[in-house]
């Protein structure tokens, strides 16, 4: 049963077209992201799933324009945020956009907060940079966002330093900084991996509530299909720097069309039923500096054909809004 | 699987091999630099009991700070319990003869979470795997080599890997090496401390399947420390759920997943991530965080966060009750 989700309208806030980010290393050019395209609509959550080294974090850094140059460089492609391509603009302009239109929550709240400033100072800093408002309103606004992320007794805790808070609380503060300037797009890079299960559940619910309130678009970077199932409307599965399958969350779970997606889903143990034996994908992903000419998954693929090794498959439509890059798809 | 098979310990499959009785571990908290004074105790593990049967897998789940790693360390004799005892084949490990202790140390092995820090970077693979044999067994170099090769094959690596160093392997392969080393002495128990949580999704399934296959072949019992309930369901025969240093629910695995009874177990299950977007989950979001083990709440330790707490939960400590065969829990609701 597919129900039309009225929360998502068709307005696109972020559009990525054929993005390529390469790194020059002594082993050669590492094509960390090699030609990915996707759209993000207003109020929707897009999950980018993949294993380590598939390029999901480089995608995130490219969207924030935080690729260390050198050795990295956005070689080609467009990132259109709110009608404007942010690839060619200079660092000064980008600094204005970063935080106010597109914000980031990273994985480890231990390293993303500065240990020598109080959390109040750190939330206020982001507001001060982007909003031209008097000091007292900045303090009020900081308190307001801290309350929004459910920090208990926010008035007294603003004076606390990061080490005085638990991991879950710290991650809430990072979230508060992320939403403090009402961005249109929030990128969450594995925000809950360092949290405990019950704290993770609290945090995910909080993100959903904030999204509902402010029509925020979220990109969830994760390796965990559980998070995708719980949080996302659409999913892009990445392998070796490219998107191999892209579709609505139900398409991906009910009708995975790329052998990699299928294998990944079959290799995850399940809570709700007894699994006799997990499917396991043999081998390892190929090194990114030495990618094969054909499909990068060919060596591990259970249904590989000769054609797969010679030519990279085109992205083909499986059904409306569901695409896969595999020769098997007709 | 027949129940008459014997395991390396000489104990029949399914019989009790290892028993923890009223184990406690309190860490003293001190104040002052020169004249230090004990001001309190962190009750990391507070009176837990469980049994591990030969050839089976006991899973211990819980959030960080619940005492699962301290329990693992006590089982490995890396920590001395404050009180209580560990019985191995019926003999007390800490208060018995030294031969019991020696036997125990070589029969209980470990695989740790992080394969990057659990292997010595300066040793070759063959030396890493042979080291337990060099220390414990009086066998020739050639016999050691043969066994190293067999172990490498069993964990899915090749003979040419034996001359390499750990940094030349990927995470999944390193975990295979750690498993080979743990199996070297033909142990009867392996303590697995989050063996797959540092690995990539597609590699996790490889290692979990390997562990299950090796259990069949070596008849070894596992004690699996984990936080992921799906992993536990796949791997274990028995599960103990821990909260704040106590076992709140202990049950055969299917019974626990079909009939989770303690409010904390229910909350953990509802907080676990779904396997499919259409999975219906009861939404129990626990408020607050785990209280400090330095000063645990009175009565039932879970009552400040418990959605079903009653007045006397704050006063009386619940007793252990059996609600189905082998399924025990500590809660006033039953």
Image (spheres, rainbow, N blue to C red):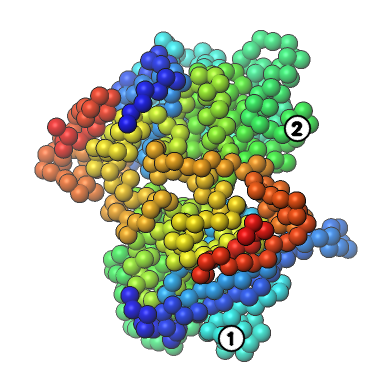
Q: Can residue A23 be seen in this view?
A: no
Chain letter belonging to callout 2:
A
Q: Position of residue B177 (x, y in %)?
A: 40, 65
Q: Residue drawn 72% across and 34% down?
A: A152
For residue A83, what is the image quadrant?
top left
Say above or below: B57 vs A187. below
In the rendered structure, find residue A183 and report the number of the disc placed on it: none
Q: Which residue lies furthest to the right in this view?
A: B35
In the picture, the quarter occupied by the C terminus of chain A is top left
Say which residue label 2 marks: A153
Seen from the viewer's position, the closer of residues B280 and B173 is B280
Against A203, residue B105 (above or below) is below
Residue B225 can be seen, yes or no? yes
Look at the picture and state if B200 lies above or below B207: above
Q: Quadrant of residue B133?
A: bottom left
* Badge 1 density bin: few <14, some 14–19, many ≥20, Cα 10 Å: some
**In this rendering, position of residue B54 left or right of residue A247:** right
Numbered label attached to residue B91 = 1
| Residue at x 51% of width, y 13% of height | A93
């Amino acid at each position: 049963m597919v129900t039309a989700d009225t929360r998502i309208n068709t307005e696109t806030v972020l559009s990525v077209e054929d993005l390529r980010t390469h790194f020059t290393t002594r082993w050669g050019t590492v094509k960390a992201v090699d030609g990915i395209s996707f759209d993000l609509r207003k109020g929707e959550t897009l999950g980018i799933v993949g294993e380590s080294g598939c390029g999901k974090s480089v995608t995130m850094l490219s969207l924030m324009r935080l690729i260390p140059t050198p050795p990295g460089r956005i070689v080609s492609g467009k990132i259109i945020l709110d009608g404007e391509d942010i690839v060619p603009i200079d660092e000064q302009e980008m600094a204005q956009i970063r935080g106010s239109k597109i914000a980031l929550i990273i994985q480890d709240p231990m390293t993303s907060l500065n240990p020598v400033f109080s959390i109040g100072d750190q939330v206020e800093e982001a507001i001060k940079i982007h909003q031209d408002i008097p000091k007292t309103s900045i303090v009020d606004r900081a308190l307001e966002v801290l309350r929004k992320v459910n920090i208990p007794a926010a008035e007294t805790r603003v004076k606390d330093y990061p080490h005085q808070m638990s991991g879950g609380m710290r991650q809430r503060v990072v979230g508060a900084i992320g939403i403090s300037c009402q961005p249109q797009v929030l990128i969450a890079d594995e925000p809950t991996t360092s949290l405990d299960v019950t704290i993770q559940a609290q945090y995910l619910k909080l993100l959903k509530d904030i999204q509902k309130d402010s029509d925020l678009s979220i990109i969830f970077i994760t390796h965990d299909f559980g998070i995708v199932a719980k949080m996302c409307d659409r999913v892009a599965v990445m392998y070796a720097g490219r998107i191999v399958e892209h579709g609505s969350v139900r398409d991906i779970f009910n009708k995975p069309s790329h052998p990699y997606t299928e294998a990944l889903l079959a290799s995850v143990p399940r809570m709700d039923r007894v699994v006799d034996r997990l499917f396991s994908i043999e081998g390892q992903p190929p090194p990114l500096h030495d990618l094969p000419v054909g499909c990068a998954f060919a060596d591990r693929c259970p249904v590989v054909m000769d054609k797969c090794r010679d030519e990279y498959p085109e992205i083909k439509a499986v059904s409306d809004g569901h695409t896969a890059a595999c020769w098997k798809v007709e | 699987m027949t129940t008459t098979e014997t395991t390396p310990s000489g104990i029949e499959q399914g019989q009790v091999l290892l028993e923890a009785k009223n184990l406690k571990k309190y860490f003293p908290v001190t104040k002052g630099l020169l004249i230090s004074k004990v001001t309190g105790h962190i009750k990391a593990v507070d009176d837990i009991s469980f049994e591990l049967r030969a050839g089976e897998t006991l899973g211990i789940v819980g959030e960080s700070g619940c005492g699962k790693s301290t329990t693992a360390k006590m089982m490995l004799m890396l920590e001395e319990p404050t009180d209580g005892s560990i019985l191995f084949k019926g003999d007390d490990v800490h208060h018995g003869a030294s031969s019991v202790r020696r036997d125990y140390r070589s029969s209980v092995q470990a695989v740790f979470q992080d394969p990057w820090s659990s292997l010595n970077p300066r040793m070759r693979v063959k030396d890493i795997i042979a080291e337990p044999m060099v220390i414990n067994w009086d066998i020739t170099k050639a016999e050691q080599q043969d066994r190293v090769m067999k172990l490498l094959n069993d964990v899915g690596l090749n003979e040419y890997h034996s001359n390499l160093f750990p940094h030349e392997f990927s995470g999944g392969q390193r975990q295979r090496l750690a498993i080979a080393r743990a199996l070297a002495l033909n142990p009867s128990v392996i303590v697995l401390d989050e063996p797959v949580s540092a690995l990539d999704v597609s590699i996790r399934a490889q290692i979990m399947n390997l562990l299950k296959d090796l259990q069949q072949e070596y008849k070894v019992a596992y004690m699996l420390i984990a936080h992921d309930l799906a992993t536990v369901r796949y791997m274990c025969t028995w599960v103990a759920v821990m909260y704040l240093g106590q076992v709140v629910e202990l049950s055969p695995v299917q019974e626990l997943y079909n009939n989770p009874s303690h409010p904390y177990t229910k909350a953990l299950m509802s907080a676990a991530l779904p396997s499919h977007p259409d999975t219906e989950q009861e939404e129990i979001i626990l408020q607050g965080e785990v209280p400090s083990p330095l000063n645990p709440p009175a009565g039932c330790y879970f009552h400040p966060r418990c959605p079903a707490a009653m007045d006397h939960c704050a006063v009386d400590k619940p007793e252990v009750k059996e609600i189905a065969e082998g399924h025990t829990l500590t809660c006033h609701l039953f």
